[in-house]
Image: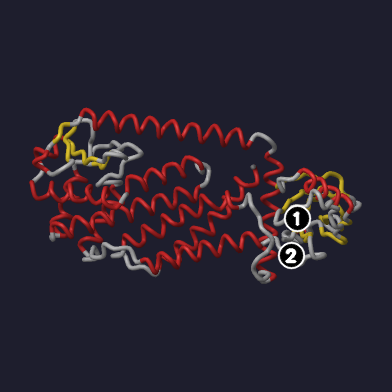
Amino acid sequence: MNLVLLNGLWQGALVVAIAALVTLRIPQRHAATRHAVWFTALLALALLPIVSLWHPAPILAPLPPPVEHTAAETSLVTAKAASASGSWLVPIWIAGVTFCLVRLVLSSARINRIVRNATPAPKFGIGVMISNDVAMPVAAGFFAPAIVIPADLATTLDPADLESIVQHERAHIRRGDIGANMVQRLIEAALFFNPWVYMIGRQLVRERESACDDWAVQAIGEPDRYASCLAQLAQGMQRSRPPLLTPSAIGSRRMLVRRIARLLNGKATQLKVNYFVLGVSVVAFGTLTALLQTSNGLPSIGNDVAVAASTCASRDVLHRGADVKILNAAMPNISKSAYRANVWANALVTVGPDGRPLTVKIVKSSGSASIDRATVNAAMASTYAPAMVNCKPTTGQYLFHVVTGP
């Protein structure tokens, strides 16, 4: 489990890089498409650690040597960190997830209380309510969504401006942003330690609000007036945050300034998602997943079982360092009764200065005690060249990888 949690850190960087490259080619006026791409990236970020629990045999052609080498380096570093973290990482993760989920439960209770105490205002439209418990307009409620407007805005804001705000919040409901926001918050709770999830989250909020701005402008037909309305709301905005599970019409002041500039530049035009571009991003994330599943698939030894490990080059030229290298990889002895197809196991081998393995620890289980035991025995039976520091042999570690065939 430690390895799965830590793998998400470097895998998240790849996911964000792909999403950034895709959205770089999407004009700002296509906010709905940009939001869809970033939401797909969020799902990919959440699924990659789960998919890593199931590691099939290589199904693609071998990666180029530099890519293979980099992937092996990364796997080794991650495995070392997972091994060093011991048994304390998972309890900390569970505690963090529990805390985040409690926040969401409290947020849900707050939303229910706000909607329950709000006063219906049919003169502003179906499903619109007025409340003294919110400082900014929000779309609230998962099963029976409603638009909640602060009472002071309902009395002071120009009716045309108020209509544009209602249209913005109605867009959240029609686009399914309330449910998407809930998914986002749940993933943030599960991956609270991963900085990439918050980077994606900021992009999601930005593009989501811009997409709803497009809906509002489409309804009222006056982008300049709508931009002026947002600026007016920002000036009187209080220092309070809406509940976590509600998308808001305002957001942060910095984000609001960007949205106003976008409206004044005439870029709020496209409401529909470009499914071709979205499909390209899905294919890109799927390809990344497949490549990560084969990044340890080095040339096999035999037809049924492949043995591989990360052979790392020098990382410290100044100190003339070199990592442990394998000289002769022993094949794991897996009985026919215990054999399972398309499973893999990683063992972290500590190698002494004399090149002999000192300890072997499974850092990624195959799910089979017999295959794990065979992996440990094969790692112990293999021969290694010790790590070198200042031209002297020293104790080092090596990631021993076993993957079974179909």
> From mark 1 to mark 2, how far is it between C-alphas?
9 Å
Q: Residue at x 51, y 52 (%)?
A: 45
Which quadrant of the rendered structure holds the N terminus? top right
Q: Secondary structure at mark 1?
A: strand
Q: Which mark is on residue 401?
A: 1
Q: Can you identify the residue that label 2 sits on? A: 298
Under mark 1, the amino acid is: His
Q: Quadrant of residue 309?
A: bottom right
Residue 306 position in % (x across, y down): 77, 61
Residue in the picture at 56% in, 34% down = 94
In this image, 250 relative to 179: left or right?
left
Which residue is drawn at the image coordinates 40% and 68% (left, top)? 277
* Quarter of the image where the C terminus is located: bottom right
Kind of residue at disc 2: Leu
Q: Which mark is residue 148?
A: none
Return the x and y of residue 333 as percentages of the image width and height.
Answer: 86, 53
Tell me what residue is drawn at x 70 percent, y 49 percent: 79
Left or right of 372 in this view: 107: left
In the figure, residue 323 lies in which quadrant?
A: bottom right
For the residue labelled by badge 2, is the local secondary structure a helix, a strand or a loop? loop
Q: Earlier in the sequence, mark 1 or mark 2?
A: 2
Looking at the image, residue 77 lies above or below residue 24: above
372 or 336, nearer to the observer: 336
Task: Please tell me how many numbered marks the rendered image carries.
Answer: 2
Q: Residue at the right extreme?
A: 354
Question: Do the CB atoms of the residues marked 1 and 2 lie less than 8 Å apart?
Answer: yes
Give neighbour class at mark 2: few <14, some 14-19, many 20+ (Cα, 10 Å): many
Expressed as whole percent of the image width and height from the top left, the position of residue 166 reads 17, 47
In the picture provided, is 132 more to the left or to the right than 50? Answer: left
Which residue, as the protein is rendered here, is positioned at the far front? 337
